[in-house]
Amino acid sequence: MSQTLIQARIKVLSSHVANQIAAGEVVERPLSVVKELIENSLDAGATEIDVEVEQGGIRLIRVKDNGSGIHKDDLALSLKRHATSKISSSEDLHKLMSLGFRGEALPSIASISRIEIRSANNGDEHAWLVRCDGKDHIEEPEPVGHPLGTSVEVRDLFFNTPGRRKFLKAEKTEFSHIETLFKRIALSRFDVAFSLSHNQRVIHKLPVANSDEQKLKRVSLICGKGFVDCALQIDFSAGGLRLAGWIAQPTFSRSQPDMQYFYVNGRNIKDKVVTHAIRQAYQDVLFHGRHPVYVLYLEIDPMLVDVNVHPTKHEVRFRDSRSIHDFIYRVLRDTIARKIAVSGSDSAEYQGQHSEPQSAGSYYSSISAEQKPGFQNFSQHSIPLKVQEQIRNYSNLYIAGSDSDSSAEDSGSGMPPLGYALAQIQGVYILAENLHGLIIVDMHAAHERITYERLKKAFTEDTIRSQPLLVPITINVSEAEVKLAEKQQQLFESLGFNVEPMGKESLVIRQVPSILRESDVEQLLRDVLSDISMHGETKRVLEEINSIFSTMACHGSIRANRKLTVPEMNALLRDMERTERSGQCNHGRPTWVQMSMSQLDKLFLRGQ
Ligand code: ADP
Ligand code: MG
């Protein structure tokens, strides 16, 4: 084989082969075709774009627009490589306003599918049609009926490159990629109406959104009402930069990074600098493993950013990424902090059935405010407690309840290993005294670990007890999520939930695991749905279930800043002693630390 390769002479490839090679880069899967076609429609100034897909786009993709149309004489040319109306000189490359400019998409797509383009251009009396069947030859245009604008129809993707077709995933998966892309584009152009249908069913219909209210409506149709209800609006400009959009309060987070939309000058991008800046802004207020939710638009002088680093990936290159990072970080951090400083009342609406009145706001301020006098509880309990008596008296007082069997004791002294509670600090830490000195417990982390281990244990023993809700909770979700929930009813049942569809886009929760009766069930269910849809329905291995449990535990646990009574605190300490791995929370942070007498002595330079 290598022999012939070495000896072969150089020849120019036929344009068909060249196009197929280019298609290898441009068209990875149906989603790529949809992206190119929608971008062409946007470049043509369309204000209405309808996307129709059949069988995940493998059988058919049709994108119809009301844009400027293609002139009859240009129709055949549009399928030729390096033919574009968008630039004519290399000068133009520097002031590029269009999404496309390479003139590669249509010829690439045409080389691996059966394509038909119908288009009516202002100058033409009627519309014209060209087709191409994956070959080099393009017939003369023929007249057809079509309103002003263009329809591009792509059938049987990869029909002539079976090797590539093999790599396509199930219809459902391919469609979900398309839907994700569609949402990303729809959030970039509020001035354009979009629709998306799959197998003749309308999945999204988004009218033009001009007013703030209409825009928020579109965001709600795409990201869900839950996000919009707790979103903070942002619009901030400084030093030639503008950041606008919506971010979720820290109380509304996701277990997956699947609701993060960021645009630079209207173009959706994924960028490490940006992601890092946002993560950092949420750093103190989001639990580990949780992902913030946002729809954000950055405007910047086009000279200071290169968005065309890669034709298919959504990358950008900022000239001065340091200052972009700082700008985004500061704006978001301040927004969250300001919200948090005044919150307490309005984030409670989102919390709905949540058992504790505290918002994430008070959580945040409690860990960041230094001046707050926080010793109200302390004086009350700072004198040695009659702990044994109190221990005997407590009965299932703290949130998850507790067994009352005897607890471990420290070598016959009568003192349990984690000792007895003295006080609670700022709603975050429990102080306890044991034989060795002082114990400090992060009560949220500790409770989370206990809940997690309990869920795991109950699951393996198949004894998750569930209890009906007095008032069933209805939540609005997407149609796809309704389907998913319906399909996964058994899984939900095994998790102790009763979840049923109620209409096309809502679910009703009638029953929840007893252990979680006090938690934010709506948020929890949303996360569980997102977990299942990301991890697929088949591989329900223990790890995923554990990660769902970890999510459940996180929501089901005592939020920081909840006042516990001393018996409740002691009950928690006893539960920690009984629970495996209770020294670490699910996120790997310690749940308690011991400060021995000698460590305490050192602090005060005693005996030195
Ligand atoms: P590019 O977008 O990089 O120019 P394409 O292969 O995607 O290359 O498209 C080739 C040309 O076909 C475009 O430059 C444009 O003139 C024309 N065209 C494609 N789609 C449309 C459309 N929906 N409306 C109007 N013109 C279009
Ligand atoms: Mg294009």
Image (cartoon, grey):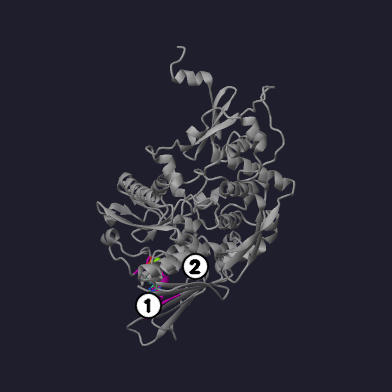
Q: Earlier in the sequence, mark 1 or mark 2?
A: 1
Residue range corresponding to the magenta coloring: 64-84
Q: Which residue is mark 1?
A: 69
Q: Which residue is mark 2?
A: 111
Q: Which quadrant: the C terminus?
A: top left
When the figure is inspected, residue 549 is found, relative to residue 423, above or below; the finding is: below
Q: In the current view of this chain or complex, which residue is farthest to the top?
A: 608
Q: Amino acid at mark 2?
A: Ser
When the figure is inspected, residue 273 is found, relative to residue 111, above or below; the finding is: above
Residue 276 in the image: state x and y as whole percent.
41, 46
Labels 1, 2: front one: 1
Where is residue 57, by image quadrant? bottom right
Is the CB–ligand 1 distance for label 1 below 8 Å? yes
Distance (Cα) linking label 1 and label 2 = 22 Å
**Secondary structure found at label 1:** loop
Residue 71 part of the magenta-drawn span: yes
Is the CB–ligand 1 distance for label 2 below 8 Å? no
Residue 370 in the image: state x and y as whole percent.
38, 37
Residue placed at 65% from the left, 39% from the top? 394
Where is residue 297, by image quadrant? bottom left
Left or right: 258 with respect to 233? right
Residue 123 in the image: state x and y as whole percent.
32, 83
Q: Amino acid at mark 1?
A: Gly
Residue placed at 43% from the left, 19% from the top? 604
Nearest the viewer among 489 and 171 is 489
Task: Classify mark 1: residues with Cα within 10 Å, few (<14), some (14-19) or many (20+).
Answer: many
When the figure is inspected, residue 142 is found, relative to residue 200, above or below; the finding is: below
